[in-house]
Amino acid sequence: MREYLFTIALCATLCFLITPFIKELAMDAGAFMHLRSRDVHKSVTPRWGGLAMWLSMAITLLIVTHLPLVGKSYGREASGIFLAATFIMLLGALDDRYDLDSITKFAGQALAAGILLLHGVQILWLPINGIYILPSNIGQLLTIFFVIVVINAVNFVDGLDGLATGIVAICAASFFAYSYLLAVVNGFNRAGAPSLITAVLIGMCVGFLPHNYHPARIFMGDSGAMFLGLLLSAAAITLTGQIDANAITNKGSGFALLPLLLPFTVLAIPLIDLGMAIVRRLRAGRSPFAADSEHLHHRLLDMGNSHRRTTAILYACTAFFAVPPVVAAFLPLWTALVAASVILGFVVLLVRESVTNTSEIKKKVVLSK
């Protein structure tokens, strides 16, 4: 655990120190966000945050490869994840600068998933009536679909200062806890790609958040959102490939389901927002990829919440979906219920206070008239 904590701290420090230089580079290169009607920021802000994250990851991996335990995590899968992440980051950087069309980005996302497949990162089984070993072609299609969904879920939620960064940090922390504890409890190898990748993810997000939190001085852009989404999806897939599914099934079906379900539970808020956006736009006769200002964070802002309160509400909602499943996997169910109740209580408190504030504002407006 100490080596993973060192990895997190190193990556966070590097990302924090590198980001200001990337901010200046992005402005000089013209990779910045112009003001648009649907945006909530009030000034021209540089993008390319993903480049700062990628540099911090690359340097961190070069250093921690010499650690006794974490160094054993390197292999074909880790190499494939790094190459795919590099490709998707470069694609996102081009989009941040030149605004690529959605078809090009989808093709690039599929190609990044293909790089993962070439390096053995693939969904191999599903917990259906025990353990169902997938035919290779079906597993490959599911892998590509899974990667694209997670990438776009993270990308869709990146609409408010610090929102996507914090949500991914919570997701990565939950997934790291699950993968590491799973190895400890079941005697698996603790030096695995899932733990390494999620540790790096946590570090990148923690280091980038001070620059990205409201008021943001730099955005992660598509270079960061797609990059983080790919790493999170790859960590989930590699975990399913490294564990003995039959051994886990013997301990309970929840253990077998969780490696594949956890990415969806921890990404519940982005996935809900993604699904609602697609349905909303299709009903309106628009393209599901057409941008609008009706995302969850826009609605919370319309309720009178500040940027920071809106972010806090969505952070807490993410924790509500992410933490209890991990707790339930290793502790009695009542412990998970207690954790869920505490987090839910915090969410209700935040929302109730925002509703109260909105009501007071409306009363003042009525009285002023």
Image (spheres, rainbow, N blue to C red):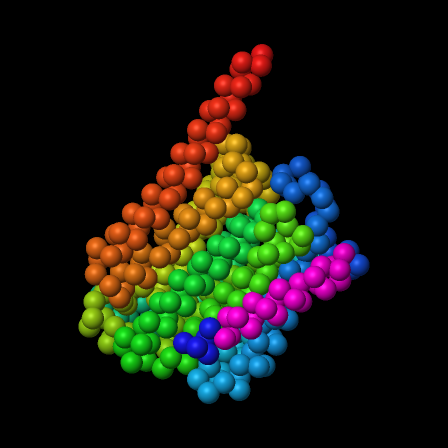
- What residue is shown at x 50% (from left), y 75% (from top)? 6
Viewer-closest of 270 and 191: 191
Of all residues, the one furthest to the right in this rendering is 28
Q: In which quarter of the image is residue 335?
A: bottom left
The answer to whether 321 is drawn above or below residue 228 in the figure is above
Query: Could you tell me residue 112's position as x and y percent?
Result: 56, 68
Q: Is residue 155 visible?
A: yes
Prevalent SS, magenta region: helix
Q: Is residue 62 left or right of residue 327?
A: right
Q: Report the span colored magenta.
A: 6-27
Q: Nearer the viewer, residue 66 or 37?
A: 66
Give the image location of residue 34, x and y in percent. Answer: 72, 46
Image quadrant in which the N terminus is located: bottom left
Picture quadrant where residue 351 is located: top left
Which residue occupies 60% across, 43% down?
291
Residue extending furthest top?
Answer: 369
Tell me the quarter of the image containing the C terminus. top right
Is residue 7 a member of the stretch shown in magenta? yes
Dividing the picture into quadrants, the one containing residue 138 is bottom left
Residue 39 position (above or below residue 221): above
Q: Is residue 122 visible?
A: no
Q: Is residue 280 magenta?
A: no
Residue occupying image coordinates x 56% and y 71%: 11
Task: Write the residue at 38% across / 39% down.
Answer: 349
x, y (%) of residue 144?
Answer: 48, 65
Q: Nearer the viewer, residue 143 or 339?
A: 339
Q: Where does residue 236 sit, x and y in percent of width and height?
A: 41, 67
